[in-house]
Amino acid sequence: MSVNKEELFDKVVNLSKRRGFVFQSAEIYGGFRSTYDYGPVGVLLLRNVKEQWWRSMVQFRQDVVGLDAAILSPPSIWEASGHLTNFTDPLVDCRECGSRFRQDKLEDPNSCPSCGAKSSFTEARQFNLMFKTNAGPVIDSAAEVYLRPETAQGMFTNFTNVLNTSRKKPPFGIAQIGKSFRNEITPGNFVFRTREFEQMEMEYFVPPADSDTWFEYWCKERLDWYLNLGIREDSLRLRVHDPDELSHYSRATSDIEFSFPWGWDELEGIANRTDYDLNQHAQASGNKLEYNDSGTGERYVPHVIEPAAGATRTAMAFLMDAYEEEEVNGEVRNLLKLDHRLSPYKVAVLPLSKKDELIQPSKEVLDLVQPHWMCDYDQTQAIGRRYRRQDEIGTPYCVTIDFETLEDKAVTVRERDSMEQDRVSIKELVEYLSSRLIP
Ligand code: GAP
């Protein structure tokens, strides 16, 4: 049963709350707009998205190393990067109802989407998206610091530290996952655009002459990452930026876009940032940021290819793409057909009944399996309803312990998508699951 696009958004938002993926932040105080908390299964999904990114970008590569830089940063970084001047959105107010909008996101620039008034907008003013705060007890301009609006700059400012300690040479990359903060004028579409979010970014430093080739390489590599994790091919596209869309630092940018219920929108941007950032920081800090090949004596400022993805936004895309409804025996089965690697729980251990004689062996099965995979254990309700609960959060395998288990020392393993069941001896259970659950 296909779910139509208009309904999909509400269904996924509803599922997120009902099953513990995402909650409105500060809900008991009426909710804090545009901030979200990740619940018991949401935090697992988000961790798995980040883990898969880290595996493909760092663990499986010898040319990329990791970093975890600070969130609080001095104005000097953002002055050099250009964010203090350029990281702005055009803000307009409606004179009739006082609502505020990003001018470039208005469908009709002469009509207020809140009250419908015509030609009621003020002149656009450039609004800087960075959050400013104070470090230390004295509140004056010398104590001003910023919450980073992207993770990227920490990788540029640590370029020499990483180069010296990792003994890498171009082409090589620095990867980082972490929170970023933007005072978005119009946050919205659930966790798509929020003021606090997580990014997964990598700065790949290359010899200048090779930058176009590496740009193409990373566009393909990153598109394949989503496809490999199960996003449907027709839900994804690569969109090349027009010259007038390019950021102040970019020579070329392509976006990986996902077909969201409201249309195509960005999941990740891949940019050729040239030597802009290293040069800016070198100039502002007075420290040379270049590569010096001691063998050949060659010295140059590398160019940078940056694949920059949003972890929270990507988790939402995986949820939307995986959501399905099926009719089974006249009832609707809600299903998250997530790739196993992203599923919050890989295995659910379910005693058929709450009777004492099944609880002990069920706990023993749980003890056997949970050192290997994230497991859920559930002994409430009828077994059919428990299967449906697990289907709805994307658990690929349910292991049921029944009264026969006491005799044959075997369990029933049910696969999520096909609902097929195998009888597997407890002794062989870990091996059975290992051959099906790729890390
Ligand atoms: N360093 C380059 C950079 O930050 P970006 O396109 O502004 O580029 C990269 O951000 C990714 O971060 C976006 O493609 C998106 O997935 C995510 N992102 C950006 N702003 C976001 C927001 N307000 N809420 C959620 N995710 C956001």
Image: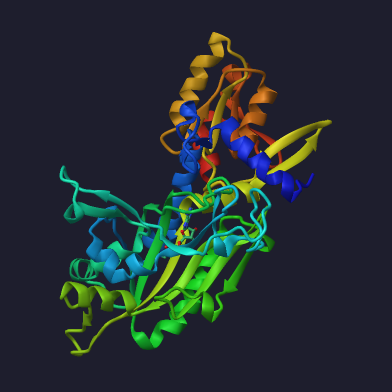
Q: Is residue 421 above or below residue 94?
A: above
Residue 434 pos. (x, y %): 51, 44
* Residue closest to the eye, 374 or 423: 374
Residue at the top extreme, as displayed: 356
Q: Is residue 242 visible?
A: yes
Residue 298 occupies quadrant: bottom left
Q: Is residue 60 visible?
A: no
Q: Residue at x 70, y 45 (%)?
A: 8
Q: Is residue 106 above or below residue 253?
A: above
Report the label total: 0
Residue 140 pos. (x, y %): 18, 51
* Residue closest to the eye, 296 or 120: 120
Q: Residue at x 45, y 30 (%)?
A: 368
Please, which colouring scheme is shown? rainbow
* Residue closest to the eye, 19 or 286: 286
Q: Is residue 163 left or right of residue 122?
A: left
Residue at the right extreme, as displayed: 330
Query: Which quadrant would the N terminus be assigned to in this image?
Result: top right
Q: Is residue 340 above or below residue 258?
A: above
Q: Residue at x 58, y 10 (%)?
A: 355
Residue 152 occupies quadrant: bottom left
Q: Is residue 240 left or right of residue 360?
A: right
Q: Is residue 400 above or below residue 439?
A: above
Residue 169 pos. (x, y %): 27, 76
Q: Is residue 417 left or right of residue 144?
A: right
